[in-house]
Amino acid sequence: MAGFIPEEKLSEIKNASNLVDIVSEVVLLKRAGKDYWGLCPFHSEKTASFKVDPEKQIFFCFGCRTGGNVFTFVMKQENISFAEAVKTLAGRCGVEIPEKGLSKAQQREMGEKQSLVETNRFGMDFFRNMLASHSSGKNAREYLGSRQLQEKTINEFHIGYAPGGWDHLVGYLTSKKVPLKSAVQSGLVIAKQGGRGYYDRFRERIMFPIFNISEQVIGFGGRVMDDTLPKYINSPETEVFNKRSSLYGLNRAKKACRTNDSVFIVEGYFDVLSMHQAGIEHTVATLGTGLTQEHIRILKGFCRRFFLVYDSDEAGIKATERIVGALVKENVEARVVPLPGESDPDSFLLEKSPEEFMLLVSKSLGVMNFLLESAIRKYGLSAEGKIRIVTDLEAPLSSIDDSVKRGIYIREIAERIDLDEPSLLEKIRKAQERRGDGSIIQTKHQESTSDAFPIMEKTELRLEKKLVAMMLQFPVIIPQIKEKHLVEHFTDPMLQSIARLVFDYRGDPDGIVSEIIMCVGDKHMESVIAQLAVGDDAWDEKGGLKLIAQFQRRLFRQQKKPLINQIKAAEASNDPDLLEKLLKEKQAQSRNKEFSSF
Ligand SMILES: [Zn+2]
Protein backbone atom coordinates (compact mmCIF):
# COMPACT_ATOMS: atom_id res chain seq x y z
CA MET A 1 0.00 0.00 0.00
CA ALA A 2 2.68 2.39 0.98
CA GLY A 3 3.93 2.10 -2.59
CA PHE A 4 6.57 4.60 -3.41
CA ILE A 5 6.23 6.75 -0.33
CA PRO A 6 8.98 5.80 2.11
CA GLU A 7 7.59 4.03 5.14
CA GLU A 8 9.31 6.28 7.63
CA LYS A 9 7.60 9.23 5.95
CA LEU A 10 4.23 7.58 6.38
CA SER A 11 4.92 6.95 10.05
CA GLU A 12 6.10 10.50 10.49
CA ILE A 13 2.87 11.86 8.99
CA LYS A 14 0.75 9.43 10.96
CA ASN A 15 2.43 10.30 14.24
CA ALA A 16 2.10 14.00 13.59
CA SER A 17 -1.61 13.77 12.77
CA ASN A 18 -3.96 13.34 15.69
CA LEU A 19 -6.89 11.18 14.61
CA VAL A 20 -9.19 12.74 17.22
CA ASP A 21 -8.51 16.22 15.79
CA ILE A 22 -8.96 15.08 12.21
CA VAL A 23 -12.22 13.25 12.94
CA SER A 24 -13.45 16.16 15.08
CA GLU A 25 -13.44 18.38 12.06
CA VAL A 26 -16.36 16.49 10.62
CA VAL A 27 -17.82 14.49 13.50
CA LEU A 28 -19.09 15.80 16.81
CA LEU A 29 -17.15 13.62 19.26
CA LYS A 30 -17.94 13.12 22.92
CA ARG A 31 -15.46 11.68 25.36
CA ALA A 32 -16.42 8.58 27.32
CA GLY A 33 -13.64 7.14 29.43
CA LYS A 34 -10.51 7.01 27.34
CA ASP A 35 -12.36 6.86 24.01
CA TYR A 36 -14.42 9.22 21.92
CA TRP A 37 -17.82 8.47 20.41
CA GLY A 38 -19.86 10.18 17.73
CA LEU A 39 -22.37 9.66 14.95
CA CYS A 40 -20.79 7.75 12.09
CA PRO A 41 -20.11 9.95 9.03
CA PHE A 42 -20.34 6.92 6.76
CA HIS A 43 -23.88 5.75 7.50
CA SER A 44 -27.16 7.11 8.87
CA GLU A 45 -27.61 6.56 12.57
CA LYS A 46 -29.38 7.97 15.58
CA THR A 47 -27.15 6.79 18.38
CA ALA A 48 -23.40 7.06 18.34
CA SER A 49 -21.70 3.82 17.33
CA PHE A 50 -18.59 5.39 15.86
CA LYS A 51 -15.64 5.07 18.18
CA VAL A 52 -12.23 6.72 18.08
CA ASP A 53 -9.50 5.22 20.21
CA PRO A 54 -6.95 8.00 20.83
CA GLU A 55 -4.30 5.64 22.20
CA LYS A 56 -4.30 3.26 19.26
CA GLN A 57 -5.13 6.07 16.83
CA ILE A 58 -7.82 4.02 15.14
CA PHE A 59 -11.55 4.35 14.56
CA PHE A 60 -14.29 1.79 14.16
CA CYS A 61 -18.02 2.01 13.52
CA PHE A 62 -20.04 -0.75 15.16
CA GLY A 63 -22.93 0.07 12.80
CA CYS A 64 -21.42 -0.16 9.32
CA ARG A 65 -18.17 -1.83 10.44
CA THR A 66 -15.89 0.67 8.79
CA GLY A 67 -12.63 1.17 10.54
CA GLY A 68 -8.97 2.02 10.16
CA ASN A 69 -6.35 4.61 10.94
CA VAL A 70 -6.03 8.28 10.10
CA PHE A 71 -5.25 7.61 6.40
CA THR A 72 -8.27 5.32 6.06
CA PHE A 73 -10.46 8.00 7.61
CA VAL A 74 -9.32 10.81 5.32
CA MET A 75 -9.58 8.56 2.24
CA LYS A 76 -13.16 7.59 3.06
CA GLN A 77 -14.26 10.98 4.27
CA GLU A 78 -12.94 12.94 1.30
CA ASN A 79 -13.33 10.10 -1.15
CA ILE A 80 -9.71 10.31 -2.26
CA SER A 81 -6.90 7.88 -2.95
CA PHE A 82 -4.31 6.78 -0.44
CA ALA A 83 -1.66 8.96 -2.06
CA GLU A 84 -3.93 11.99 -1.85
CA ALA A 85 -4.75 11.28 1.78
CA VAL A 86 -1.03 11.07 2.53
CA LYS A 87 -0.42 14.35 0.77
CA THR A 88 -3.37 16.07 2.47
CA LEU A 89 -2.24 14.98 5.91
CA ALA A 90 1.40 15.76 5.15
CA GLY A 91 0.40 19.28 4.16
CA ARG A 92 -1.51 19.78 7.36
CA CYS A 93 1.22 18.64 9.68
CA GLY A 94 4.05 20.16 7.69
CA VAL A 95 5.85 16.98 6.61
CA GLU A 96 7.45 17.19 3.17
CA ILE A 97 7.04 14.28 0.79
CA PRO A 98 9.57 13.97 -2.00
CA GLU A 99 7.53 14.19 -5.23
CA LYS A 100 9.52 11.47 -6.92
CA GLY A 101 8.49 9.23 -4.06
CA LEU A 102 5.10 8.87 -5.69
CA SER A 103 4.32 6.44 -8.46
CA LYS A 104 3.44 7.79 -11.91
CA ALA A 105 -0.22 6.90 -11.46
CA GLN A 106 -0.36 8.43 -8.00
CA GLN A 107 1.26 11.60 -9.29
CA ARG A 108 -1.20 11.79 -12.16
CA GLU A 109 -4.25 11.29 -9.98
CA MET A 110 -3.07 13.68 -7.35
CA GLY A 111 -1.86 16.02 -10.01
CA GLU A 112 -5.33 16.50 -11.47
CA LYS A 113 -7.08 17.47 -8.27
CA GLN A 114 -4.09 19.38 -7.04
CA SER A 115 -3.80 21.37 -10.24
CA LEU A 116 -7.53 22.14 -10.15
CA VAL A 117 -7.34 23.72 -6.70
CA GLU A 118 -4.09 25.47 -7.60
CA THR A 119 -5.58 26.90 -10.78
CA ASN A 120 -8.60 28.05 -8.80
CA ARG A 121 -6.26 29.70 -6.31
CA PHE A 122 -4.62 31.65 -9.16
CA GLY A 123 -8.06 32.60 -10.42
CA MET A 124 -9.04 33.84 -6.98
CA ASP A 125 -5.86 35.95 -6.69
CA PHE A 126 -6.59 37.51 -10.07
CA PHE A 127 -10.21 38.36 -9.19
CA ARG A 128 -9.08 39.76 -5.83
CA ASN A 129 -6.53 42.04 -7.49
CA MET A 130 -9.08 43.25 -10.00
CA LEU A 131 -11.49 44.19 -7.23
CA ALA A 132 -8.95 45.71 -4.87
CA SER A 133 -6.86 47.91 -7.08
CA HIS A 134 -7.68 47.72 -10.77
CA SER A 135 -9.55 50.57 -12.45
CA SER A 136 -12.08 48.13 -13.91
CA GLY A 137 -12.96 47.06 -10.38
CA LYS A 138 -14.23 50.51 -9.44
CA ASN A 139 -17.86 49.77 -10.34
CA ALA A 140 -17.70 46.50 -8.48
CA ARG A 141 -16.35 48.21 -5.36
CA GLU A 142 -19.20 50.69 -5.52
CA TYR A 143 -21.72 47.93 -6.04
CA LEU A 144 -20.50 46.00 -2.99
CA GLY A 145 -20.60 49.24 -1.00
CA SER A 146 -24.20 49.79 -2.04
CA ARG A 147 -24.98 46.36 -0.66
CA GLN A 148 -23.36 47.42 2.60
CA LEU A 149 -20.59 44.87 2.49
CA GLN A 150 -17.75 45.78 4.80
CA GLU A 151 -14.10 45.64 3.77
CA LYS A 152 -13.49 43.02 6.46
CA THR A 153 -16.17 40.71 5.07
CA ILE A 154 -14.90 41.14 1.50
CA ASN A 155 -11.42 40.14 2.64
CA GLU A 156 -12.48 37.26 4.85
CA PHE A 157 -14.50 35.70 2.07
CA HIS A 158 -11.90 36.59 -0.61
CA ILE A 159 -14.50 38.21 -2.81
CA GLY A 160 -13.23 39.43 -6.17
CA TYR A 161 -14.25 40.78 -9.55
CA ALA A 162 -14.04 39.32 -13.03
CA PRO A 163 -13.61 42.22 -15.47
CA GLY A 164 -15.33 42.54 -18.84
CA GLY A 165 -13.49 41.57 -21.99
CA TRP A 166 -12.71 38.05 -23.07
CA ASP A 167 -9.22 37.09 -22.12
CA HIS A 168 -8.02 38.96 -19.04
CA LEU A 169 -7.87 35.83 -16.94
CA VAL A 170 -6.49 33.79 -19.85
CA GLY A 171 -3.66 36.33 -20.10
CA TYR A 172 -3.02 36.32 -16.36
CA LEU A 173 -2.92 32.52 -16.10
CA THR A 174 -0.59 32.33 -19.11
CA SER A 175 1.74 34.87 -17.50
CA LYS A 176 1.78 32.71 -14.36
CA LYS A 177 2.56 29.61 -16.47
CA VAL A 178 -0.65 27.89 -15.36
CA PRO A 179 -1.46 25.23 -17.96
CA LEU A 180 -4.63 26.34 -19.78
CA LYS A 181 -5.68 22.70 -19.96
CA SER A 182 -6.31 22.68 -16.20
CA ALA A 183 -7.92 26.13 -16.44
CA VAL A 184 -10.40 24.58 -18.88
CA GLN A 185 -10.92 21.62 -16.53
CA SER A 186 -11.58 23.98 -13.62
CA GLY A 187 -14.16 25.80 -15.74
CA LEU A 188 -12.48 29.18 -15.35
CA VAL A 189 -11.74 29.41 -19.06
CA ILE A 190 -13.43 27.87 -22.06
CA ALA A 191 -11.70 26.53 -25.17
CA LYS A 192 -12.88 28.16 -28.39
CA GLN A 193 -14.29 25.88 -31.03
CA GLY A 194 -11.83 24.50 -33.52
CA GLY A 195 -8.92 24.90 -31.10
CA ARG A 196 -8.56 28.62 -31.76
CA GLY A 197 -7.60 29.71 -28.27
CA TYR A 198 -9.46 30.30 -25.03
CA TYR A 199 -11.77 32.83 -23.38
CA ASP A 200 -12.85 33.69 -19.81
CA ARG A 201 -16.02 32.08 -18.51
CA PHE A 202 -16.71 34.76 -15.87
CA ARG A 203 -16.96 38.34 -17.18
CA GLU A 204 -18.22 41.46 -15.43
CA ARG A 205 -19.23 39.54 -12.38
CA ILE A 206 -18.67 39.71 -8.62
CA MET A 207 -16.75 36.55 -7.83
CA PHE A 208 -17.37 34.40 -4.76
CA PRO A 209 -14.74 31.69 -4.30
CA ILE A 210 -16.15 28.49 -2.81
CA PHE A 211 -13.91 26.68 -0.32
CA ASN A 212 -14.02 23.18 1.07
CA ILE A 213 -13.47 22.69 4.79
CA SER A 214 -9.75 22.23 4.17
CA GLU A 215 -9.69 25.82 2.84
CA GLN A 216 -9.02 24.80 -0.76
CA VAL A 217 -10.74 26.79 -3.51
CA ILE A 218 -12.95 24.25 -5.26
CA GLY A 219 -15.12 26.52 -7.42
CA PHE A 220 -16.66 29.96 -7.93
CA GLY A 221 -19.99 31.67 -8.04
CA GLY A 222 -20.24 34.78 -10.19
CA ARG A 223 -23.00 37.40 -9.89
CA VAL A 224 -23.84 40.22 -12.28
CA MET A 225 -24.19 43.73 -10.88
CA ASP A 226 -27.38 44.61 -12.74
CA ASP A 227 -30.45 42.69 -13.88
CA THR A 228 -28.73 40.81 -16.70
CA LEU A 229 -29.57 37.12 -16.81
CA PRO A 230 -28.39 34.71 -15.69
CA LYS A 231 -27.97 36.49 -12.38
CA TYR A 232 -25.60 33.82 -11.10
CA ILE A 233 -23.29 31.39 -12.77
CA ASN A 234 -21.30 28.75 -10.93
CA SER A 235 -18.22 26.78 -11.88
CA PRO A 236 -19.12 23.50 -13.55
CA GLU A 237 -18.83 20.31 -11.53
CA THR A 238 -15.26 19.07 -11.47
CA GLU A 239 -13.18 16.42 -9.73
CA VAL A 240 -13.06 18.74 -6.70
CA PHE A 241 -16.40 20.54 -6.96
CA ASN A 242 -19.69 18.78 -6.35
CA LYS A 243 -22.67 21.03 -5.66
CA ARG A 244 -24.62 18.34 -3.87
CA SER A 245 -21.98 18.09 -1.20
CA SER A 246 -20.54 21.62 -1.14
CA LEU A 247 -21.80 24.43 1.05
CA TYR A 248 -20.84 28.07 0.65
CA GLY A 249 -19.29 29.52 3.80
CA LEU A 250 -18.89 26.26 5.71
CA ASN A 251 -15.14 26.82 6.03
CA ARG A 252 -15.84 30.02 7.94
CA ALA A 253 -18.96 28.79 9.74
CA LYS A 254 -17.82 25.44 11.09
CA LYS A 255 -16.42 26.74 14.35
CA ALA A 256 -19.53 28.77 15.19
CA CYS A 257 -21.73 25.78 14.26
CA ARG A 258 -19.94 23.79 16.94
CA THR A 259 -20.17 26.52 19.55
CA ASN A 260 -23.87 27.13 18.93
CA ASP A 261 -24.76 23.53 18.12
CA SER A 262 -26.82 24.93 15.27
CA VAL A 263 -26.58 26.17 11.69
CA PHE A 264 -28.58 28.57 9.52
CA ILE A 265 -29.04 27.32 6.00
CA VAL A 266 -29.73 30.09 3.51
CA GLU A 267 -29.95 30.27 -0.27
CA GLY A 268 -27.54 32.93 -1.47
CA TYR A 269 -23.98 34.21 -1.21
CA PHE A 270 -25.12 37.63 -0.01
CA ASP A 271 -27.31 36.01 2.65
CA VAL A 272 -24.26 34.26 4.11
CA LEU A 273 -22.25 37.49 4.06
CA SER A 274 -24.98 39.57 5.72
CA MET A 275 -25.54 36.97 8.40
CA HIS A 276 -21.80 36.92 9.14
CA GLN A 277 -21.74 40.69 9.31
CA ALA A 278 -24.64 40.56 11.73
CA GLY A 279 -22.54 38.29 13.92
CA ILE A 280 -24.52 35.15 13.03
CA GLU A 281 -21.51 33.28 11.77
CA HIS A 282 -22.98 29.79 11.84
CA THR A 283 -24.55 30.30 8.41
CA VAL A 284 -24.01 28.43 5.15
CA ALA A 285 -25.67 28.48 1.73
CA THR A 286 -26.53 25.70 -0.66
CA LEU A 287 -25.37 26.21 -4.23
CA GLY A 288 -28.58 26.08 -6.22
CA THR A 289 -29.30 22.43 -5.54
CA GLY A 290 -31.42 22.89 -2.43
CA LEU A 291 -30.45 21.03 0.70
CA THR A 292 -29.39 17.45 -0.04
CA GLN A 293 -28.91 14.39 2.11
CA GLU A 294 -25.15 14.80 1.63
CA HIS A 295 -25.34 18.34 3.00
CA ILE A 296 -27.27 17.12 6.03
CA ARG A 297 -24.67 14.45 6.68
CA ILE A 298 -21.85 16.95 6.48
CA LEU A 299 -23.55 19.55 8.69
CA LYS A 300 -24.49 16.90 11.22
CA GLY A 301 -20.80 16.58 11.94
CA PHE A 302 -20.87 20.09 13.35
CA CYS A 303 -24.24 20.51 15.03
CA ARG A 304 -27.63 18.96 15.64
CA ARG A 305 -30.03 21.87 15.13
CA PHE A 306 -30.76 23.16 11.62
CA PHE A 307 -32.57 26.39 10.81
CA LEU A 308 -33.78 26.65 7.24
CA VAL A 309 -34.11 30.25 6.10
CA TYR A 310 -35.85 30.63 2.75
CA ASP A 311 -36.52 33.63 0.54
CA SER A 312 -40.27 33.17 0.41
CA ASP A 313 -43.00 31.01 1.79
CA GLU A 314 -43.67 29.27 -1.49
CA ALA A 315 -40.01 28.41 -2.11
CA GLY A 316 -39.72 27.34 1.50
CA ILE A 317 -42.67 24.99 1.24
CA LYS A 318 -41.39 23.32 -1.91
CA ALA A 319 -37.85 22.94 -0.55
CA THR A 320 -39.04 21.68 2.84
CA GLU A 321 -41.39 19.13 1.28
CA ARG A 322 -38.48 17.65 -0.65
CA ILE A 323 -36.12 17.30 2.28
CA VAL A 324 -38.43 16.38 5.18
CA GLY A 325 -37.81 12.66 4.81
CA ALA A 326 -34.04 13.05 4.86
CA LEU A 327 -34.10 15.43 7.82
CA VAL A 328 -36.21 13.05 9.88
CA LYS A 329 -34.10 10.10 8.79
CA GLU A 330 -30.88 11.81 9.80
CA ASN A 331 -32.47 12.65 13.12
CA VAL A 332 -31.63 16.33 13.11
CA GLU A 333 -33.85 18.92 14.71
CA ALA A 334 -34.86 21.09 11.76
CA ARG A 335 -36.94 24.24 11.92
CA VAL A 336 -38.04 26.75 9.32
CA VAL A 337 -37.47 30.44 10.04
CA PRO A 338 -40.30 32.51 8.53
CA LEU A 339 -39.19 35.76 6.89
CA PRO A 340 -41.81 38.43 6.34
CA GLY A 341 -43.12 39.15 2.83
CA GLU A 342 -40.63 38.93 0.01
CA SER A 343 -37.52 39.43 2.09
CA ASP A 344 -34.45 37.23 2.20
CA PRO A 345 -31.92 37.24 5.07
CA ASP A 346 -29.80 39.81 3.23
CA SER A 347 -32.60 42.31 2.63
CA PHE A 348 -34.06 41.69 6.08
CA LEU A 349 -30.77 42.44 7.81
CA LEU A 350 -30.24 45.56 5.67
CA GLU A 351 -33.21 47.13 7.43
CA LYS A 352 -33.53 45.26 10.69
CA SER A 353 -31.25 44.38 13.57
CA PRO A 354 -29.77 40.97 14.35
CA GLU A 355 -31.99 40.93 17.46
CA GLU A 356 -35.07 41.23 15.28
CA PHE A 357 -33.82 38.34 13.20
CA MET A 358 -33.33 36.23 16.33
CA LEU A 359 -36.88 37.08 17.33
CA LEU A 360 -38.05 35.43 14.10
CA VAL A 361 -35.86 32.45 14.92
CA SER A 362 -37.64 32.07 18.24
CA LYS A 363 -40.89 31.81 16.27
CA SER A 364 -39.55 29.14 13.93
CA LEU A 365 -41.56 25.96 13.45
CA GLY A 366 -40.48 22.35 13.12
CA VAL A 367 -40.46 21.25 9.47
CA MET A 368 -43.71 19.24 9.53
CA ASN A 369 -45.47 21.93 11.55
CA PHE A 370 -44.29 24.57 9.13
CA LEU A 371 -45.79 22.62 6.22
CA LEU A 372 -49.03 22.08 8.11
CA GLU A 373 -49.46 25.72 9.15
CA SER A 374 -48.59 26.92 5.63
CA ALA A 375 -51.23 24.60 4.19
CA ILE A 376 -53.83 25.74 6.72
CA ARG A 377 -53.08 29.37 5.86
CA LYS A 378 -53.41 28.57 2.21
CA TYR A 379 -56.56 26.43 2.20
CA GLY A 380 -58.40 27.22 5.42
CA LEU A 381 -60.18 24.65 7.56
CA SER A 382 -63.34 24.07 5.54
CA ALA A 383 -64.04 20.49 4.45
CA GLU A 384 -62.49 21.16 1.02
CA GLY A 385 -59.60 22.93 2.71
CA LYS A 386 -58.85 19.90 4.89
CA ILE A 387 -58.87 17.61 1.87
CA ARG A 388 -56.33 19.82 0.15
CA ILE A 389 -54.19 20.06 3.26
CA VAL A 390 -54.05 16.28 3.53
CA THR A 391 -53.28 15.97 -0.17
CA ASP A 392 -50.38 18.42 0.15
CA LEU A 393 -48.95 16.67 3.20
CA GLU A 394 -49.22 13.19 1.73
CA ALA A 395 -45.86 13.25 -0.04
CA PRO A 396 -43.73 14.67 2.80
CA LEU A 397 -45.41 12.38 5.36
CA SER A 398 -44.92 9.27 3.29
CA SER A 399 -41.25 10.14 2.78
CA ILE A 400 -40.65 9.57 6.51
CA ASP A 401 -39.31 6.04 6.83
CA ASP A 402 -39.58 5.77 10.59
CA SER A 403 -43.13 4.59 11.29
CA VAL A 404 -43.10 5.75 14.92
CA LYS A 405 -42.15 9.29 13.97
CA ARG A 406 -44.58 9.27 11.08
CA GLY A 407 -47.31 8.16 13.47
CA ILE A 408 -46.53 11.03 15.84
CA TYR A 409 -46.77 13.57 13.03
CA ILE A 410 -50.00 12.06 11.76
CA ARG A 411 -51.57 12.23 15.21
CA GLU A 412 -50.56 15.88 15.60
CA ILE A 413 -51.93 16.78 12.20
CA ALA A 414 -55.18 14.90 12.79
CA GLU A 415 -55.64 16.79 16.05
CA ARG A 416 -54.76 20.19 14.61
CA ILE A 417 -57.22 20.00 11.72
CA ASP A 418 -59.73 17.88 13.61
CA LEU A 419 -59.65 14.84 11.39
CA ASP A 420 -60.13 11.16 12.08
CA GLU A 421 -56.65 9.73 12.73
CA PRO A 422 -57.12 6.19 11.35
CA SER A 423 -58.37 7.48 8.02
CA LEU A 424 -55.38 9.80 7.73
CA LEU A 425 -53.07 6.90 8.56
CA GLU A 426 -54.70 4.80 5.89
CA LYS A 427 -54.31 7.54 3.31
CA ILE A 428 -50.60 7.92 4.04
CA ARG A 429 -50.11 4.16 3.93
CA LYS A 430 -51.65 4.06 0.46
CA ALA A 431 -49.50 6.98 -0.64
CA GLN A 432 -46.46 5.06 0.52
CA GLU A 433 -47.47 2.02 -1.45
CA ARG A 434 -47.78 4.21 -4.54
CA ARG A 435 -44.33 5.59 -3.92
CA GLY A 436 -43.29 2.00 -4.19
CA ASP A 437 -39.71 2.73 -3.30
CA GLY A 438 -39.77 0.22 -0.50
CA SER A 439 -38.80 2.91 1.92
CA ILE A 440 -40.66 1.14 4.70
CA ILE A 441 -38.59 -1.97 4.48
CA GLN A 442 -35.32 -0.21 3.75
CA THR A 443 -32.70 -1.23 6.27
CA LYS A 444 -30.46 1.36 7.77
CA HIS A 445 -27.21 -0.28 6.91
CA GLN A 446 -26.13 -3.54 5.45
CA GLU A 447 -24.80 -4.97 8.66
CA SER A 448 -24.96 -8.58 7.57
CA THR A 449 -23.35 -8.10 4.18
CA SER A 450 -20.51 -5.88 5.33
CA ASP A 451 -19.82 -7.73 8.53
CA ALA A 452 -16.39 -9.21 8.68
CA PHE A 453 -17.65 -12.50 10.03
CA PRO A 454 -20.94 -14.38 9.83
CA ILE A 455 -23.14 -14.12 12.91
CA MET A 456 -23.12 -17.84 13.57
CA GLU A 457 -19.46 -18.44 13.85
CA LYS A 458 -17.68 -21.57 14.83
CA THR A 459 -15.79 -21.84 18.08
CA GLU A 460 -12.49 -22.04 16.14
CA LEU A 461 -13.18 -18.76 14.48
CA ARG A 462 -14.25 -17.15 17.73
CA LEU A 463 -11.02 -18.25 19.42
CA GLU A 464 -8.88 -17.15 16.47
CA LYS A 465 -10.53 -13.75 16.53
CA LYS A 466 -9.97 -13.46 20.26
CA LEU A 467 -6.31 -14.37 19.93
CA VAL A 468 -5.70 -11.78 17.23
CA ALA A 469 -7.67 -9.18 19.19
CA MET A 470 -5.51 -9.94 22.20
CA MET A 471 -2.31 -9.54 20.20
CA LEU A 472 -3.48 -6.15 18.94
CA GLN A 473 -4.73 -4.92 22.30
CA PHE A 474 -2.09 -6.50 24.51
CA PRO A 475 1.10 -6.80 22.46
CA VAL A 476 3.31 -8.14 25.32
CA ILE A 477 1.57 -11.49 24.82
CA ILE A 478 2.73 -11.80 21.19
CA PRO A 479 5.94 -13.81 21.86
CA GLN A 480 3.94 -16.43 23.80
CA ILE A 481 1.59 -16.98 20.88
CA LYS A 482 4.44 -16.98 18.40
CA GLU A 483 6.51 -19.59 20.18
CA LYS A 484 3.57 -21.99 20.50
CA HIS A 485 2.98 -21.87 16.73
CA LEU A 486 -0.73 -21.39 17.19
CA VAL A 487 -1.21 -19.23 14.13
CA GLU A 488 -0.19 -22.06 11.80
CA HIS A 489 -3.39 -23.84 12.80
CA PHE A 490 -5.73 -20.93 12.12
CA THR A 491 -8.65 -21.82 9.87
CA ASP A 492 -9.38 -18.26 8.77
CA PRO A 493 -6.86 -17.05 6.18
CA MET A 494 -7.45 -13.36 6.87
CA LEU A 495 -6.93 -13.72 10.60
CA GLN A 496 -3.85 -15.75 9.84
CA SER A 497 -2.36 -13.01 7.67
CA ILE A 498 -3.17 -10.35 10.26
CA ALA A 499 -1.42 -12.45 12.91
CA ARG A 500 1.62 -12.82 10.64
CA LEU A 501 1.74 -9.06 10.11
CA VAL A 502 1.71 -8.69 13.88
CA PHE A 503 4.62 -11.09 14.19
CA ASP A 504 6.61 -9.21 11.60
CA TYR A 505 6.04 -5.86 13.26
CA ARG A 506 9.21 -4.46 14.79
CA GLY A 507 8.21 -0.96 15.85
CA ASP A 508 6.90 0.64 18.99
CA PRO A 509 4.21 -1.64 20.55
CA ASP A 510 1.92 1.34 21.15
CA GLY A 511 1.73 2.08 17.44
CA ILE A 512 1.21 -1.51 16.35
CA VAL A 513 -2.41 -1.25 15.19
CA SER A 514 -2.28 1.86 13.07
CA GLU A 515 1.12 0.84 11.65
CA ILE A 516 -0.18 -2.55 10.58
CA ILE A 517 -3.28 -1.03 9.04
CA MET A 518 -0.97 1.08 6.94
CA CYS A 519 0.69 -1.85 5.23
CA VAL A 520 -2.46 -3.87 4.58
CA GLY A 521 -3.83 -2.22 1.45
CA ASP A 522 -7.21 -3.90 1.70
CA LYS A 523 -10.18 -1.92 3.00
CA HIS A 524 -12.01 -4.93 4.35
CA MET A 525 -8.95 -6.15 6.19
CA GLU A 526 -8.32 -2.67 7.59
CA SER A 527 -11.81 -2.66 9.05
CA VAL A 528 -11.34 -6.14 10.52
CA ILE A 529 -8.11 -5.05 12.22
CA ALA A 530 -9.77 -1.93 13.60
CA GLN A 531 -12.74 -3.96 14.78
CA LEU A 532 -10.54 -6.43 16.66
CA ALA A 533 -8.26 -3.76 18.07
CA VAL A 534 -10.92 -1.39 19.26
CA GLY A 535 -12.42 -3.80 21.80
CA ASP A 536 -12.16 -3.07 25.48
CA ASP A 537 -11.21 -6.39 27.04
CA ALA A 538 -9.02 -5.85 30.05
CA TRP A 539 -6.19 -8.17 29.09
CA ASP A 540 -3.57 -9.32 31.54
CA GLU A 541 -0.90 -12.03 31.47
CA LYS A 542 -3.08 -14.55 33.30
CA GLY A 543 -6.11 -14.08 31.07
CA GLY A 544 -3.86 -14.18 28.03
CA LEU A 545 -2.30 -17.50 28.97
CA LYS A 546 -5.73 -18.90 29.73
CA LEU A 547 -6.91 -18.06 26.24
CA ILE A 548 -3.79 -19.60 24.72
CA ALA A 549 -4.40 -22.79 26.71
CA GLN A 550 -8.02 -22.86 25.62
CA PHE A 551 -6.96 -22.61 21.99
CA GLN A 552 -4.42 -25.39 22.46
CA ARG A 553 -6.95 -27.71 24.08
CA ARG A 554 -9.34 -27.20 21.22
CA LEU A 555 -6.57 -27.84 18.73
CA PHE A 556 -5.62 -31.01 20.56
CA ARG A 557 -9.18 -32.32 20.59
CA GLN A 558 -9.44 -31.75 16.88
CA GLN A 559 -6.22 -33.53 16.12
CA LYS A 560 -7.21 -36.35 18.43
CA LYS A 561 -10.58 -37.03 16.84
CA PRO A 562 -9.39 -38.85 13.74
CA LEU A 563 -7.02 -40.93 15.93
CA ILE A 564 -9.91 -42.21 18.02
CA ASN A 565 -11.75 -43.17 14.86
CA GLN A 566 -8.66 -44.99 13.61
CA ILE A 567 -8.32 -46.88 16.90
CA LYS A 568 -11.94 -47.96 16.67
CA ALA A 569 -11.37 -49.10 13.10
CA ALA A 570 -8.24 -51.05 14.09
CA GLU A 571 -10.16 -52.81 16.88
CA ALA A 572 -12.95 -53.68 14.51
CA SER A 573 -10.59 -55.08 11.87
CA ASN A 574 -8.57 -57.03 14.44
CA ASP A 575 -5.20 -55.46 13.61
CA PRO A 576 -3.15 -55.66 16.86
CA ASP A 577 0.02 -54.09 15.36
CA LEU A 578 -1.80 -51.08 14.09
CA LEU A 579 -3.79 -50.85 17.33
CA GLU A 580 -0.64 -50.77 19.42
CA LYS A 581 0.91 -48.10 17.23
CA LEU A 582 -2.17 -45.95 17.44
CA LEU A 583 -2.48 -46.32 21.21
CA LYS A 584 1.13 -45.20 21.60
CA GLU A 585 0.40 -42.15 19.54
CA LYS A 586 -2.59 -41.35 21.70
CA GLN A 587 -0.47 -41.60 24.85
CA ALA A 588 2.10 -39.25 23.39
CA GLN A 589 -0.65 -36.75 22.54
CA SER A 590 -2.01 -36.84 26.09
CA ARG A 591 1.45 -36.05 27.45
CA ASN A 592 1.73 -33.14 25.06
CA LYS A 593 -1.59 -31.87 26.20
CA GLU A 594 -0.41 -31.72 29.82
CA PHE A 595 2.62 -29.71 28.78
CA SER A 596 0.79 -27.36 26.57
CA SER A 597 -1.83 -26.53 29.15
CA PHE A 598 0.73 -24.65 31.18
ZN1 LIG B 1 -20.94 3.65 10.29
Image (spheres, helix red, strand yellow):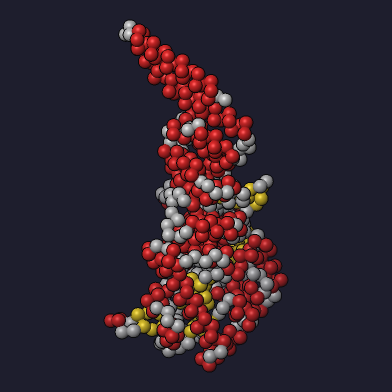
Say which residue appears at 46% left-offset and 19% top-offset: 589
**Looking at the image, which residue sits at the far right?**
355
Say which residue appears at 61% left-offset and 31% top-offset: 543
Q: Is residue 82 above or below residue 233?
A: above
Front residue of 156/204: it is 156
Image location (x, y in percent) of residue 94: 56, 66
**Looking at the image, which residue sits at the far bottom?**
135
Q: Is residue 364 above or below residue 153?
A: above
The number of discs equals 0
Q: Is residue 368 above or below residue 429?
A: below
**Looking at the image, which residue sits at the far left?**
194
Q: Which image quarter is the C terminus in?
A: top right
Tell me if I can see residue 481 in this picture: yes
Image location (x, y in percent) of residue 159: 55, 79
Say which residue appears at 34% left-offset and 10% top-offset: 577
Q: Is residue 520 above or below residue 596?
A: below
Q: Residue 200: which quarter of the image?
A: bottom left
Image location (x, y in percent) of residue 32: 66, 47
Say which residue appears at 52% left-offset and 66% top-offset: 96
Front residue of 449/581: it is 581
Image location (x, y in percent) of residue 490: 44, 33
Q: Residue 3: which quarter of the image?
A: bottom left
Tell me if I can see residue 456 in this picture: no
Front residue of 112/417: it is 112
Q: Which image quarter is the N terminus in?
A: bottom left
